[in-house]
Image (cartoon, helix red, strand yellow):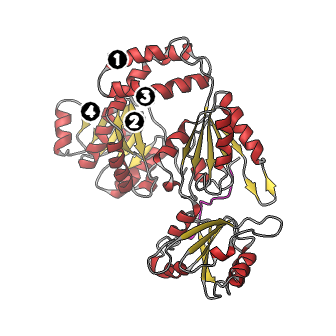
Amino acid sequence: MELLPIFLDLNGKPCLVIGGGTTAARKVGSLLRSGAAVTLVSPTLCETLERKAEVGEFRYVARCFEPQDLPGNRLIIAATDEGETNRHIAQLANALDIPVNVVDDPEACTFLLPSIVDRSPVTVAISTGKASPVLARLLRTRLESLIPAGYGRLAEFSGRYRHRVKTRFTDQRDRRRFWDRVLQGAVAERVFAGQFEEAEAIIEQELAPDALDQDMGEVYLVGAGPGDPDLLTFRALRLMQQADVVVYDRLVAAPILEMTRRDARRIYVGKQRNHHAMRQEEINRLLADLAKDGFRVLRLKGGDPFIFGRGGEEIDTLAAEGIPFQVIPGITAASGCAAYAGIPLTHRDHAQSVTFVTGHLKDGSIDLNWPALAQPNQTVVFYMGLVGLPIIVERLMAHGVPAEMPIALVEQGTTHMQRVYTGTLATIGDIVTAAQPQPPTLVIVGEVVKLRDKLNWFSPPDEPVQGATVPIL
């Protein structure tokens, strides 16, 4: 983070605003809503500020700014129409170690005022740092429609039970399970509807002595997609925020892992060629044991858990032992990486079918139905095919695929690290030798690869910061 978001208690604290225009009026309004004791210095006032001054909402000093106005204030906002005056105020405030905000001059600020979604006592603050205040306002508009006003009532309602819940459930995990049920279930719905008596009756049932006697946890098998956090499903994100333990793979992008609960325990079980942090049988056992201990376990897997993800093996163990589980699909690498590379997997003129196969080598060979994969008018996608690429190319050509057949390699697809290499079966070997792509790299074979030149839309940044293969341990 470039800036640390904090919430200040300004109730009754002296704050100074310098300037009398509409921008100053917005700043004064925010300070007054927080309970601050506002002093405003300006020779003139806009109509909004005049009305507030007339009823005494703030102390008004009708003159130009003077340096002696600054000492003793908790924070200062410089909102005059003169840029040089504002910067001078900022310099004086910095010398006094008083936080200062300068409107339309983020470089002169020591703090920024965010865009706010107010559902008091719930407050959501949005900032883009010093990059784009307009974008922050757009995000606020989106959130305004997603966060009902009832969340303020829900916060007040749950706050009345906070001490009782802490006394009733001494274990932090039990308290979290209690609040998860209350804040996402029938209690919340009744508070939103204003049915407070019914909400109180339900929460009293939840506080009963035997309410948490069931110790069995649950496993969430979640597909994290190919790397871009924006490709997660809403349900995946909700469960990621609920889990007590996160068991994750090597191909889970770091920004996605950061979207899980900050206080959740993280267990890395990633696999690389010739190196496994944990054997699959041990992973299966781990998930079952954690759930039996009462934890909500997030099994976070790259792509889709049921496409070359061995998810079926994991839930087979859970089902055999009677452990509750959910499966949340993710965008598989073939679909996501091809889309971000500008390569449609099917096209009326080029491919009427698509086949996903694993290119993972075993005993130095790839045991696949090569005659079927060599058929025309199809797209073949090889997962984990980079190491075995020479064999893949040789076997396809041996079964009649022409040397001119287009082929693409998509390295770290959908992330900021994405690189795409295109050629033909005859030339791809030299391209790999020169470029040295690294796993995870998807291999796409078919006439559809030729469409990339026209359909390519995604351009990763020149200085990438988000990859898909660096585990956070």
The residue shown at (53%, 54%) is 229
Tell which circle, 4 or 1, labels the residue nearer the N-terminal end. Answer: 4
- Res. 185 mark: 3
469 magenta-colored: yes
Callout 2 amino acid: Thr
Q: Closest to the observer: 135 or 98?
A: 135
> Do the CB atoms of the residues marked 2 and 4 lie less than 8 Å apart?
no
User: Badge 1 is on which residue?
Assistant: 198
Q: Is residue 174 above or below residue 370?
A: above
Principal SS element in the magenta part? Answer: loop
Q: Residues within 10 Å of mark 4 (few under 14, many from 20)?
A: some
Q: Is residue 395 above or below residue 203?
A: below
User: Badge 2 is on which residue?
Assistant: 123
Callout 4 amino acid: Arg
Q: Horizontally, is 102 left or right of 248 in the view?
A: left
User: Badge 4 is on which residue?
Assistant: 59
- Res. 271 mark: none
